[in-house]
Amino acid sequence: MFLNLKDQEKLDIYLPNKEFFPIKNFGFIVTNSLSNSLLLINLNGLIIKGKEIRIEWVFLK
C-alpha cells in the first residue's frame, strides 16, 4: 500500500523530513524526526496537530 499525495508540496512544508508508517485498515502515521510532529492520515484527510487540513490523496493497492 502506498500513499500518493496530490499536494505533496504542502505536506513537505509541514513535514520536510517525513516518514510514513502504514496501518492496516486505517491509513498512515507520518512522523517528522526533526520536530517530533505526528500526523494521522485516514480516509477523512490529513490531520495536523489536531487541526484537519484537506489534502487530496489516494491509496494505491
Image: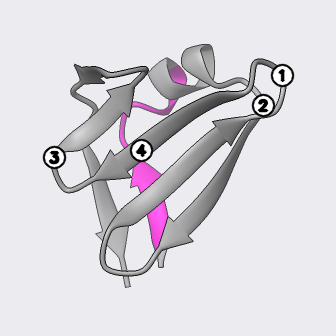
Residue tagged by mark 2? 17
Indicate whether residue 8 is drawn in magenta: yes
Residue in view at x 78 percent, y 31 percent: 17
Are discs 1 and 2 less than 8 Å apart at CB? yes
Secondary structure under tag 2 reads loop
Relative to the observer, which residue lies in front, 38 or 56? 38
The image position of residue 31, as x and y in percent, is 66, 40
- The stretch of residues the image draws in magenta is 2-9
Residue type at tag 1: Leu
Residue type at tag 3: Asn
Question: Which marked residue is nearer to the observer: mark 4 or mark 2?
Answer: 4
Relative to the observer, which residue lies in front, 31 or 13? 31
Residue tagged by mark 1? 34
Name the colour scheme: one colour
Cα–Cα gap, marks 1 and 2: 7 Å
Q: Is residue 35 above or below residue 6?
A: above
Q: Earlier in the sequence, mark 3 or mark 1?
A: 1
Q: Label 3 neighbourhood size at 10 Å, few (<14), some (14-19), many (20+)?
A: few
Residue furthest to the right: 34
Residue type at tag 2: Asn
